Image (cartoon, rainbow, N blue to C red):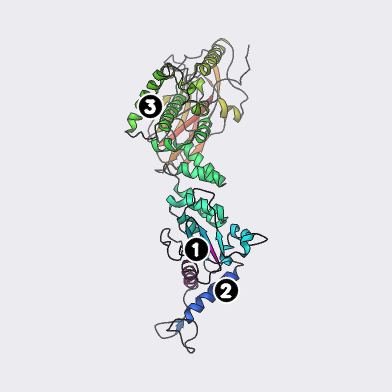
Amino acid sequence: MGAVNSQMPSNRVGHAPEEPGAPEGEEEAEEVAVAVIEEGEESEEARPTTSQGRHKRKTGPEGQLTKAPHRKRAKDRLESVYKTLFLRGEGSDVQIRALGEEWNLHKVYLCRSGYFASMFSGAWRETTMDTVELQMPDENIDCEALHEALGSLYRNSVLIPPGRVVPMLATASMLQLDKLIQQCGEIMKETVSDQTVCSYYCSAESYGLQNIRAMCLQWLLDNLMTQHSEEVLREVSLDLMKEVIASSELFVMEVEMDVYTTLKKWMFLQLQPTWRGPRRDLLPDADSWFARSRQESEGTPFLETEQGRAFVPAFQQLRLAYMICDLPSARIIDQDALIPATWLTPVYKEQWLALLRAEQTRDLGPVDVVVSDLQRTSMRCGGQLLRDKQCSWRWAGFNVGWDLVVCYANRRIIFKRSALNKSCGLGVSLLWQRKVAFRLRLASLDRAGRAIFRKETELQVLSLGKDEELEVVNLENEDVVFPIYVTCNFLYLPREGRFPE
């Protein structure tokens, strides 16, 4: 098999402008390059004469000698090094074989990689070998990525398209190319979207880019329920979905029951990955498929079937207490028969006792609340402000007698406790004062789903009498872009185990 000189096309990945000069501390590599290039120049028929000098010089309009810009000369030198040493393999002292291809390279350049620096030093057998066979431990590494990564040792950096980031990151991680790893991370930051977020997340987790992992997780928390992307649902793994659903940072639209609906769609797409159809048909098709499965299993809850057990960890993150207190939601859960009755029965009992405590005791609500309480047990709900226009709404759920109305007017969000006996869940408490703990968050997203505006309140305990109101957020001096997503975490009850008399 012939050596890979110009066999691998160099235009697969475009190259970014280079920094002038050779990397610091690598004069030996420069000397090798200069020696090989000068030797090639001397072999040319039209060589400069002694009077012309060894180096070509430019003349200005008036015949005076002028110097080429330093950056251009450095770039030309690096490009010459890349073509002469890497693509043509001149002066090679080691051959690298991998993925069915061969590269004639130079140890002095390869040692810019931590991987090869360790290989060619010490007592390793590869130190004195002329040919080195590389085994690829990672299926993400392909021949094109390896070619570009090796080439970057001769020209410092490459311009990486988003579609090539994962193979390049895998290759750079194996070869311990810190600069290339950093470059991949920067590209991932700029190009995260519904098409890349899951692959970026998995790669960042595999190759230790914790900041990219956190960024992708935040993108999913912001977008999973606001963008309704079927492609994202197809790509989200079980472990990732479990982490997203468990988080109190999830932007829930509208109430906790909608989290259940999202999980049901996701589970259907995992089981039926070839499904294609209009978005409006996804939920009906999922319901029909699970209904047939229920008939075949003679009524066994789906999460207790062989197919369903794998999805239990994700469904266990649902906050069932805020789903069963809405009659239409409770009926859907019962009809779907996805969730085992053994999960639901204790929740029904706990919520019934909580309602009795709220209505028949002097329990005013939570007093001393910590962030961990909000993360584990808060009611998550949200909505969307499509434009800067006055509006109001209620979030249905287990509000323990509160009729808490949310109002948006004059770029302010206001909470109001209504005392009017309107339909608002489980009735209106007769207690003069009630308390609720909450944290409210706002975000505007660009077309790629990245946050361009974000604001949130601190964890607060709100105490309101009947018909009292509180300004929660003021956006008057904020540069916001509509639509704005609004999400809130509520705690209406004291910590578990505290039963006031």
Q: Is residue 80 magenta-colored? A: yes
Residue 411, visible in the rendered structure: no
Residue 354's label in the rendered image is none
N-terminal of the two: label 3 or label 2? 2
Whole-number angstrom distance, CA of label 2 to CA of label 1 = 21 Å
Decide which of tag 3 and tag 1 comes sooner along the chain.
1
Q: CA distance from mark 3 to mark 2?
A: 66 Å
User: Which x, y percent locates residue 296?
Assistant: 40, 19
Q: Which residues are magenta?
A: 71-95
Q: Which residue is mark 3?
A: 286
Q: On the image, numbered disc 1 is attached to which residue?
A: 103
Q: Residue at x 67, y 60 (%)?
A: 123
Q: Which mark is residue 31?
A: 2
Dot 3 surroundings within 10 Å: few (below 14), some, or many (20 or more)? Answer: some
Q: Nearer the viewer, mark 2 or mark 1?
A: 1
Residue 94 coordinates in the image, percent (x, y):
55, 66
